[in-house]
Amino acid sequence: MAEFNLFNKEESQQRFCLREEKLRVLQEEKDARVALIRRQQQALDEQQKAVDLEFMMKDHTIYQEPMLQLILYLVTSPMVVALVVAGLAVGMIVVASKHDTDLNIRQITYNLSLA
């Protein structure tokens, strides 16, 4: 009888060890799948970054270069510089004349109040 109980105990312990081993193997497989998915995601992220960078570089050269040339042309063009200076002068004249008009209205109002 003691031999049967010992055999039963060993069998139970063996099943427990097999179950532990099976769970350990399943956990290792799960960890390996997670690591693989992370590596794949990281590779996709790196690939997308490279594509984005390439697009930005193309975008920069396609659109920025002609725009830069236009800006340089406009900045160095004597006609454009003259127009900007003239525009600033006209703006200053308009502000000054509005200021003078306000002063004239105040003066007229003051003179009428004295009369």
Image (tube, grey):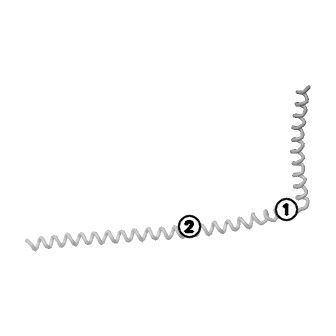
Say which amino acid is labelled 2: Asp
Q: Position of residue 81 (x, y in %)?
A: 88, 59
Helix, strand or loop at disc 1? helix
Helix, strand or loop at disc 2? helix
Q: Residue at x 59, y 67 (%)?
A: 48
Asked whether the beta carbons under mark 2 and mark 1 sit within 8 Å of each other, the answer is no
Q: Residue at x 81, y 62 (%)?
A: 71
Quarter in which the C terminus is drawn: top right
Q: Left or right: 10 with respect to 113?
A: left
Instruction: Pick the residue in front: 36 or 104.
Output: 104
Q: Quadrant of residue 102?
A: top right
Q: Residue at x 89, y 40 (%)?
A: 100
Q: Position of residue 113 (x, y in %)?
A: 88, 27
Q: How many marks?
A: 2
* Label annotation for residue 45: 2
Instruction: Pick the residue in front: 4 or 53.
Output: 53
Q: Position of residue 85 (x, y in %)?
A: 89, 55
